[in-house]
Each structure stands twice: as C-alpha cells, then as structure tokens.
Image (cartoon, rainbow, N blue to C red):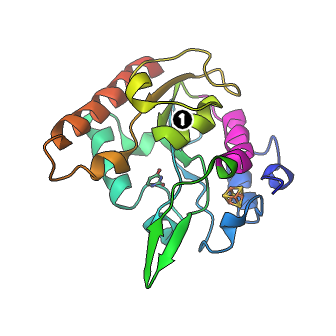
Amino acid sequence: DAGAAPFVPEGAPIDALRAAAAGCRGCELWEPASQVVFSAGPPSASIVLVGEQPGDQEDRRGLPFVGPAGQLLVRAIRDAGIDPAAVYRTNAVKHFRFEQRGTRRIHKTPEVHHITACHPWLHAEFGQLSPGIVVALGATAGRSVFGRPVRIGAERGTVLEGAIPDSPAKALLTAHPSAVLRMQGEPGYDDAYAALVADLRTAAAAAG
Ligand code: URA
Ligand code: SF4
C-alpha cells in the first residue's frame, strides 16, 4: 500500500488533520475498523504522548486511551503529578488492528508496514505541535517516533535530545500501559506501574 501521505493535508492544523484522517485509505486497517481514532488534548501541550494504536473501546468511541490500558495510563499520569487534560494524546497507528474471534475482537500488534504507512499523520501532527517532550509508549510508538527499532528494557526512561527525525522536541521511551496492565495480579505489577509513573515524572521535569 502507498501509505497515508496522499490523504494528509500537510501543514493543516490538528482539527483539519483529524477530519481528513477519517478518509484515510493508506493501509488496509481502515476497512474492518469502526472509525479512525486520531488524537485528543490541546495542540499547545508541553507533553505529547504517543501510543500504539486504538483498542476495542477506542475504536467504538473514536477517542484515544479510553479503554482499560488508557485508564491505567491516565491514573499513572495523575500519579506523576501531571494533569491528563493538559497532555496531547495520539497513536502511531490510527485504526484498530484486530482479529475477530466469535463476538470478540482480539487486539493484534501492528506490523512495521502499518507503522510506516501511518507515519505521515504523526509527521503532520509534529509539524503542528511544539511540545517540550514526546513520550513514546512501547515498541510500536518508539519505532514510529524514533524511526528505528527500539528496545524498551534497554532504552526506557532516558531523556533524549535530537532523537526524533521530524521534531526538535526531547523524547523519552517508556513501557506501553497494556504491558503494565497485563501484569495485574502478578508479583512484578507494583514495580512495573511505579516505573511507568517514574518515567512520566522524568518526562514532565524535562518538558519545561
Ligand atoms: N489506547 C490507545 O489509544 N492507545 C494505546 O496505545 C493503548 C490504549
Ligand atoms: Fe490510514 Fe493509518 Fe488508518 Fe492505515 S491505520 S488507513 S495509514 S489512518
């Protein structure tokens, strides 16, 4: 597939990008999904969070980070001393990728070609935003934001300068909230949640 570029009104403000994204056919993910999920939060935000892709709830409601992983993230943002409403929230891939099993829709991680196809939207968003820091949540977001494969374990939690090819903002890689959510009820959960909060605190301090 050709990717999102032909559908992106380059240089248009966020609201116009959001409206145009509804018509994107840059990869095959638009068709089984209910709708595009673009972004939420003020374009003037000093912190930009980039997730992987919308989940089941996000796909139904058309809003990012409203499902279980999103709720965990919002709690972590608050626990880091940040107002969630002041953060711009978006995703590397803007349609929900899933496998239908009976009545259930099971999340499927996007492939690299989906990340690449959808990147023109994130690029256009970066052109309209001027954050102090961009936080990439997990490996998919990391690949899209940094334009290269990333390893969460080895690279998380460090404030990076000049690491985003299409933005002058600082950047920080951390875990995806779904990865933390999956650990609920396991011994490592408290530490994993605390590490996410600590990374968000680090990001807020660097955002200026
Ligand atoms: N919700 C989103 O919108 N994105 C994620 O990456 C996870 C949950
Ligand atoms: Fe376009 Fe991205 Fe949706 Fe693919 S996932 S159709 S590139 S908006």
Please say whether residue 119 is one of the residues in the magenta stretch: yes
> What type is the residue that disc 1 sits on?
Gly
For disc 1, the neighbor class at 10 Å (few under 14, some 14 to 19, many from 20) is many
In this picture, is 66 found above or below 158?
below
In the picture, measured across the screen, residue 73 lies left or right of residue 141, that is left
| Res 204 → quadrant | top left
Residues 46 and 60: in front is 60
Could you tell whether 44 is left or right of 23 in the image? left
Residue 104 on image: x %, y %: 42, 78
12 within the magenta span: no
**Direction from residue 161 to residue 24 in the image, left or right:** right
Q: Which residue is at the far bottom?
A: 102
Q: Residue at x 60, y 20 (%)?
A: 163
Q: What residue do we see at 46% from left, 29% from top?
A: 173
Image coordinates of residue 46 in percent, x first then y, are 51, 29
Residue sitting at x 74%, y 53%: 16
In this picture, which residue range is highlighted in magenta? 115-130
State the residue in front, 149 or 67. Answer: 149
Quarter containing the N terminus: bottom right
Picture residue at 69% right of the left edge, 49% below the top:
113
Where, by quadrant of the figure, is residue 158 drawn?
Answer: top left
- Is residue 44 visible in the rendered structure shown here? no
Q: Main secondary structure of the magenta part?
A: helix
Name the residue carrying label 1: 142
- Residue 184, how many percent across, how many down? 20, 52
